[in-house]
Image (tube, helix red, strand yellow):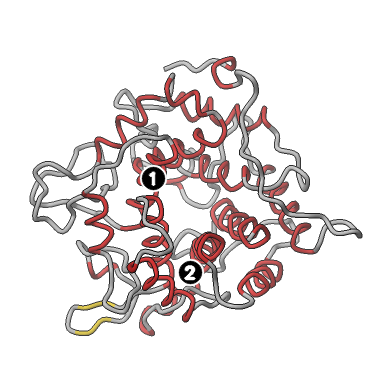
């Protein structure tokens, strides 16, 4: 479906009012400088067609899922620190929507799908921030595709009921849901909420089934071997990144700070928070603690900004991120296990974490 410049730039791209990140009397703080330098470096990875393609992973080489993710991270950087290049963002959105499949999905432009539910959800979230009018115009099919992916009718009684699958070329059929997880489901819920689109109530049931007895959350109740935490008799402990996803999903579904399930998860997250790694990962899976640390930092910062964190969480997170920023302004994980070795991924997570920590 062709998308015109006029359609995406009616009145200019909209941006939310940035959270106040005040400049001190002597100019930007080291954290603010790191945020601005990182954003400038991430914009430098944008290709001429507007997309953010991976140079590390062929599956992500077109930039279908990475582009909206980077846009969301960059949109949160206060303009006082770095003016937002609206023309560059508009070009990215046009190129994304030009790849929309006949079914209304982003992620099918190449023979091997690029996480279509993630890519579509992130594109909706980016449009909700940058050009909401497109969601009732040329981008409307995205909402129909995403909401249609949720496992609802016919999935009652399944542990995957209410979740969002990967978004393959063929939809899963009962009783085999395929790969479903809390991370993907959280992104879909957040996107639909941002667009003002209803989410089937079964989503809450799936999120709660990802809960652990200790108050935290796990990655998936459908494929338990993918959970990264310690297990005893088939019961897994909650761990950092999954607990962040669970909390953010509950908030997107309308649960507030006073909710008992939210409080239980927050208490566990606050008690086990670490700035240097993803906490509560099983000893035998220690690599995942380091390989997912940027993912965890972004999630924890967003949770703590909204609900409160342990004492000193901002300083610890900011110090760790500044120490790991590369000379080129970008961030990279030394481990490729969770694809955080791709600077677009690690840097987008770092910007999200810094933006939240500085504005908390």
Q: Nearer the viewer, mark 2 or mark 1?
A: 1
Q: Pick whichever, 180 or 336, lies toward us.
A: 180
SS for dot 1: helix
Give the answer, above or below, for where 199 lies relative to 288. above
Mark 1 Cα shell of 10 Å, populated few (<14), some (14-19), many (≥20): many
Do tag 2 and tag 1 residues touch (Cβ < 8 Å)? Answer: no
The N terminus lies in which quarter of the figure?
top left
Which x, y percent locates residue 205?
22, 56
Quadrant housing the C terminus: bottom right
**Label 2 neighbour load within 10 Å: few <14, some 14-19, many 20+:** many
Image side of residue 102 versus residue 291, left or right: left
Q: Position of residue 224 (x, y in %)?
A: 23, 68
| Disc on the earlier residue, 2 or 1 | 1
What residue does disc 1 label?
Answer: 118
Q: CA distance from mark 2 to mark 1?
A: 20 Å
Q: Residue at x 50, y 44 (%)?
A: 66
Residue 96 spot, x, y in % from top left: 49, 30
- The reply, left or right, for residue 79 in relation to residue 74 is right
- Measured from the top left, where is residue 85 in percent x and y? 70, 34
Left or right of residue 329: residue 127: left
Which label number is shown at residue 54?
none
Q: Secondary structure at mark 2?
A: helix
Which disc, if any, is residue 291?
A: 2
Give the residue at x 56% y 57%: 349
Left or right, residue 7 beside residue 119? right
């Amino acid at each position: 479906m062709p998308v015109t410049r006029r359609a995406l730039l009616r009145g200019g791209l909209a941006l939310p009012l940035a959270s106040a990140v005040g400049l001190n009397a002597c100019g930007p703080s080291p954290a603010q400088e790191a945020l601005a330098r990182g954003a400038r470096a991430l914009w430098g990875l944008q290709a001429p067609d507007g997309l953010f393609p991976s140079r590390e992973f062929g599956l992500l080489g077109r930039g279908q899922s990475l582009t909206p993710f980077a846009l969301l991270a960059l949109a949160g950087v206060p303009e006082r620190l770095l003016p937002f290049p609206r023309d560059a963002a508009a070009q990215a959105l046009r190129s994304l929507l030009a790849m929309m499949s006949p079914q209304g999905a982003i992620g099918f432009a190449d023979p091997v799908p690029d996480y279509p539910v993630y890519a579509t959800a992130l594109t909706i979230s980016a449009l909700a921030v940058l050009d909401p009018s497109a969601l009732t115009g040329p981008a409307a099919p995205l909402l129909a595709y995403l909401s249609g992916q949720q496992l609802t009718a016919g999935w009652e009684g399944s542990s995957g009921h209410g979740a969002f699958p990967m978004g393959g070329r063929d939809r899963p059929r009962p009783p085999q849901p395929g790969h479903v997880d809390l991370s993907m489901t959280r992104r879909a819920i957040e996107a639909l909420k941002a667009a003002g689109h209803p989410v089937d109530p079964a989503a809450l049931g799936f999120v709660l089934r990802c809960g652990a007895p200790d108050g935290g959350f796990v990655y998936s109740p459908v494929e338990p071997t993918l959970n990264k935490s310690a297990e005893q008799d088939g019961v897994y402990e909650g761990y950092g990144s999954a607990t962040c996803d669970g909390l953010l999903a509950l908030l997107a579904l309308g649960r507030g700070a006073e909710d008992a399930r939210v409080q239980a998860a927050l208490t566990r997250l606050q008690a086990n928070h670490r700035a240097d790694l993803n906490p509560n990962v099983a000893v035998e899976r220690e690599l995942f603690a380091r390989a997912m640390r940027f993912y965890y930092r972004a999630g924890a910062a967003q949770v703590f900004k909204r609900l409160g964190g342990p004492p000193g969480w901002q300083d610890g997170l900011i110090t760790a991120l500044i120490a790991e920023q590369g000379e080129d302004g970008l961030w990279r994980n030394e481990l490729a296990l969770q694809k955080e070795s791709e600077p677009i991924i690690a840097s987008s997570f770092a910007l999200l974490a810094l933006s939240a920590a500085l504005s908390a």
